[in-house]
Image: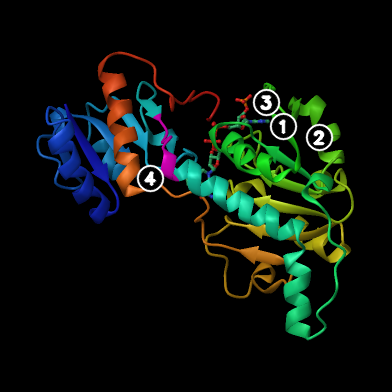
Amino acid sequence: MTIVHCGDPKRGAAWAEIFARDLPEVPFRCWPDIGDAQDVRYLIAWTLSEEVISALPNLEVLFSIGAGVDQLDLSILPPHVRVIRMIEPGITTTMAEYVTMAVLALHRDLPALVAGQRAGTFPYMPVKMARERRVGIMGLGELGQAAIRMLAPIGFRLSGWSRSGREIQGVETFAGEEGMDAFLGGLDILVCLLPLTPETCGILCRETFAKMPRGAALINVARGGHLVQEDLLSALDEGAISAAFLDVSTPEPLPETHALRSHPAVFLTPHIAGVTRIDTAVYALIDALKGVMAGQSVAGDIDRSRGY
Ligand code: NAP
Ligand code: GLV
């Protein structure tokens, strides 16, 4: 019943110690030192390769190191293998902090203020209250809801959009394609926290921007594949979108000459919005593994047919 960690050796070494102490009945090995491959039932990884999958004939469960699973090429994983994503307080808290930071920066017109500082013009911007700013979250799962919990006490007018629709106190919610136009039409700041699936790929595109009020701003903290980057550049240049925070891109990082890298209204960060913490995620992994071994469903179970 071995678990194999495939990834950062520092994290692997730290987690091996904690497993030896807290779950000694499950040997924790670090790829490529997997011991007897026949014994390996569990794998924890950020990405997958044919080499790793073909070396583990008895794999039963793949745990994602991240909250998302699209970075794992699940097409090379046998269909019976269960996939479980990471839900842990390190990712949740850091994501909520990042979204709050970006919303506040856009709310207080930081891009225009920084541009004014660089130009030496120090423009005096009319200042709005948070209650006058409409912030919409696409994706009302673990992270979307965590962002809402951090933003709500500041006073923003919050709305949310998801596939099935969710009721969240104090938040106006919309569901599915039929709810999308009404959701987008009432926003000053749009935050993307969707999983990347065939349905959501390219969702941040010209058509979407056209449904938002002119001059709205964008925060993409989900995946680069959600955004059509050329459409954002055109929307910025046309004034349809006023500014953007992008924590993710295609590729990561963007090439040095890419226009988004030097655009004055764009803040780029290197995929650090929500971070899997070595010191907290290991306990989430152990809890999930205990659930699996007890034959239970666990919070991060992925529906492979749905892609999230
Ligand atoms: P989650 O709990 O699975 O929530 C996903 C939400 O998206 C759900 O509300 C779901 O709707 C909604 N959704 C899925 N497909 C949809 C569709 N076609 N149309 C409308 N809504 C749809 O995921 P999470 O834990 O919040 O994470 C979201 C994503 O954040 C991850 O998949 C990952 O890509 C990204 N992420 C990024 C970073 C970073 O550092 N940048 C860090 C962590 C995660 P239902 O409620 O109806 O199911
Ligand atoms: C990071 O991007 C994650 O999916 O946790």
Residue at x-position 53% and y-position 64%: 253
User: Residue beneath label 1, please?
Assistant: 161
Per the model, the C-alpha gap separating discs 2 and 1 is 7 Å
User: Quick check: marks 2 and 1 in contact, CB under 8 Å?
Assistant: yes
Q: Which amino acid does the dot numbered 3 rest on? A: Ile
Q: Earlier in the sequence, mark 2 or mark 1?
A: 1
Q: Which amino acid does the dot numbered 2 rest on? A: Phe
**Closer-to-camera residue (63/132):** 132
Query: In the rendering, which numbered label is found on residue 168?
Result: 3
Query: In the rendering, which numbered label is found on residue 220?
Result: none
**Closer-to-camera residue (262/134):** 134
Residue at x-position 69% and y-position 25%: 169
Of labels 1 and 3, the one closer to you: 3
Query: In the rendering, which numbered label is found on residue 46?
Result: 4
Q: Which residues are magenta?
A: 84-90
At mark 1, the secondary structure is strand
Q: Is residue 143 located in the magenta-colored stretch of the structure?
A: no
User: Quick check: marks 1 and 3 in contact, CB under 8 Å?
Assistant: no
Q: Is residue 24 visible?
A: yes
Q: Earlier in the sequence, mark 1 or mark 4?
A: 4
- Residue 118 percent across, percent down from the top left: 73, 82
Per the model, the C-alpha gap separating discs 4 and 3 is 31 Å
Of labels 1 and 4, the one closer to you: 1
